[in-house]
Amino acid sequence: MNPVSAFRSLFGDCPLVAIIRGVTPEEAVEIGEAIFSAGIRIIEVPLNSPDPLASIERLARRFGAEALIGAGTVLDPLDVARVAEAGGRLIVSPNTSTAVIEATVAAGMVSSPGYFTPSEAFEAVHAGAHALKFFPAEAATPAVVKAQRAVLPAKVPLIVVGGIRPDNMRPWLEAGADGFGLGSGLYRPGQSSDEVAANARAYVEGVKGGRP
């Protein structure tokens, strides 16, 4: 299954993206297994983590086709090839960089750029983005997503990132969000795999209970 088809399948089953910023290669697999055990199948290692490509390589080797592993905070199109070489199949950015999006699409990987305004969203879609990361959600409300959803292509998933907790998902979903990216509420450096597994289970239950 190609990366885009894998994303659609795995995101359809569980619309959550685990963002494990700060993870080290030594703990990446253990943390990844904790997240996987809760039902989350998409894992992002931000490139401002310690030796992120090594973590991506270990996670990709461990999970293979069972999960979609990729990189976050990708700002340079040259990093797309490096992530691909490490086994990553997903590229996530905090911003709307058409150069990164186009490099990702050309590499056959999943592109999920960050955006905040409709102009940025349409720029990303026209460049080939497969999903849109609404970020930072702390600076907006579900009403903003509802207004944007009325004009954005329905086929492009809208993933809300920033300040998401298991108990505040419902308003975003009712507004038209398709899923969520989970950061420090899921994983913070120094947390044990048991803590991360418990956090992940809470988020999975939260998204199930929050669906309209």
Image (cartoon, grey):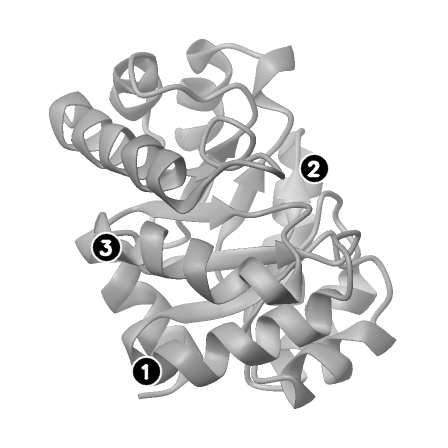
In the rendered image, which quarter contains the C terminus?
top left
In the rendered image, the quadrant that contains the N terminus is: bottom left
The part of the image, by quadrant, that contains residue 198 is: top left
Which of disc 1 and disc 3 is earlier in sequence?
A: 3
Q: Which residue is mark 1?
A: 65
Is residue 120 shown left or right of residue 11? right
Q: Nearer the viewer, mark 3 or mark 1?
A: 3
Is residue 68 shown left or right of residue 105?
left
- Is 63 in front, or is 171? 63
Residue drawn at point x = 38 percent, y = 86 percent = 2
Residue nearest the viewer, comparing 96 with 24: 24
Q: Which of the 4 image quadrants contains residue 47? A: bottom right
Apparent side of residue 66 relative to residue 165 in the rendered image (left or right): left
* Tag 1: amino acid: Ala
Q: Is residue 81 above or below residue 146?
A: below
Q: Is residue 129 visible?
A: no
The residue sitting at 34% across, 70% down in the picture is 67
What is the CA distance from the residue labelled 3 to the residue labelled 2? 38 Å
Whether residue 88 is situated above or below residue 203 in the rendered picture: below
Q: Position of residue 166 (x, y in %)?
A: 31, 21
User: Badge 2, how many Cα within 10 Å: few under 14, some, many 20+?
Assistant: few
Earlier residue among tags 3 and 2: 3
Q: Nearer the viewer, residue 183 or 189?
A: 189
Q: Nearer the viewer, residue 94 or 33?
A: 33
Q: Which element type, helix, strand or loop, lies under badge 3? A: helix
**Residue assigned mark 2:** 119
Disc nearer the start of the sequence (2/1): 1
Q: Which residue is mark 3?
A: 37
